[in-house]
């Protein structure tokens, strides 16, 4: 098994842990492949997935978007195919993108990182 991957650990929830705690919002979600932490992507205002990597050293993430099966290694800067992960693999299909419902401002595209 590749270092930084623990396919047995479930995700920490269905949305970005920090955004949900502080009333924020996200564009897309990423899952730490080592501990299951769900954080928001680098396009999102707060970029919690990258912050999680910087704070913990957990360097492999997987998309938490339905149907996306890619993994990314922050250390190498490369995407790669990865193993099956503990369920649920993705956030619920009915969860809006961006999300969460009710927290996304109407002018959300003015607040993203490009």
Image: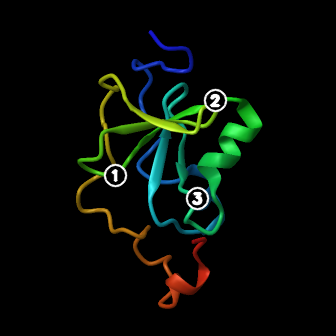
- Of label 2 and label 3, which has the lower sequence position? 3
Q: Compared to 46, does 101 lie above or below?
A: below
Question: In the displayed image of the protein, which residue is found farthest to the right?
Answer: 55
Q: Is residue 98 above or below residue 11?
A: below
Asked whether the residues under the numbered discs 1 and 3 touch, taking CB atoms below 8 Å apart as contact, a structural biologist would say no
Q: Residue placed at 33% from the left, 22% from the top?
A: 83
Q: Quadrant of residue 56?
A: top right
Rendered residue at 24%/62% (across/down): 94
Looking at the rendered structure, the secondary structure element under dot 3 is loop
Compared across the picture, whether 114 is left or right of 2 comes to: right
What distance separates the C-alpha of mark 1 from that of mark 3? 14 Å
Identify the residue under disc 3: 42
Residue that appears at 62% across and 69% down: 45
Q: Nearer the viewer, residue 18 or 73?
A: 73
Alpha carbons under labels 2 and 1: distance apart: 19 Å
How many C-alpha atoms fall within 10 Å of the one at disc 1: few (<14), some, or many (≥20)?
some
Q: For mark 2, does the 10 Å Cα neighbourhood hold few (<14), some (14 to 19), or many (20 or more) residues?
A: many
Q: Residues within 10 Å of mark 3 (few under 14, many from 20)?
A: many
Mark 2 vs 3: CB contact within 8 A: no
Specify the quadrant of the image occupied by residue 85. Answer: top left
Q: Is residue 97 above or below residue 103?
A: above
Query: In terms of secondary structure, where does tag 2 sit?
Result: loop
Label 2 sits on residue = 58
Between the residue at mark 2 and the residue at mark 3, the CA separation in whole angstroms equals 16 Å
Q: Measuring from the top left, give residue 81's x and y in whole percent.
A: 34, 30
Quarter of the image with the C terminus in it: bottom right
Q: Name which of mark 2 and mark 1 comes first in the sequence.
A: 2
Which residue in the structure is indicated by mark 1? 65
Q: Residue furthest bottom?
A: 107
Give the number of callouts: 3
Return the x and y of residue 96 as percentages of the image width and height.
33, 68
Looking at the image, residue 32 sits to the left or right of residue 92; the answer is right
């Amino acid at each position: 098994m590749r270092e930084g991957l623990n396919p047995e650990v479930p995700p920490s929830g269905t949305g970005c842990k920090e955004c949900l705690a502080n009333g924020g919002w996200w564009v897309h979600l990423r899952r730490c492949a080592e501990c299951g932490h769900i954080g928001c992507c680098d396009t999102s205002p707060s970029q919690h997935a990258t912050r999680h990597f910087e704070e913990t050293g957990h360097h492999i993430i997987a998309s938490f978007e339905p149907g996306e099966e890619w993994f990314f290694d922050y250390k190498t800067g490369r995407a790669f195919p990865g193993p099956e992960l503990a369920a649920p693999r993705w956030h619920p299909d009915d969860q809006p993108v961006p999300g969460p419902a009710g927290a996304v401002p109407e002018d959300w595209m003015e607040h993203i990182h490009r």
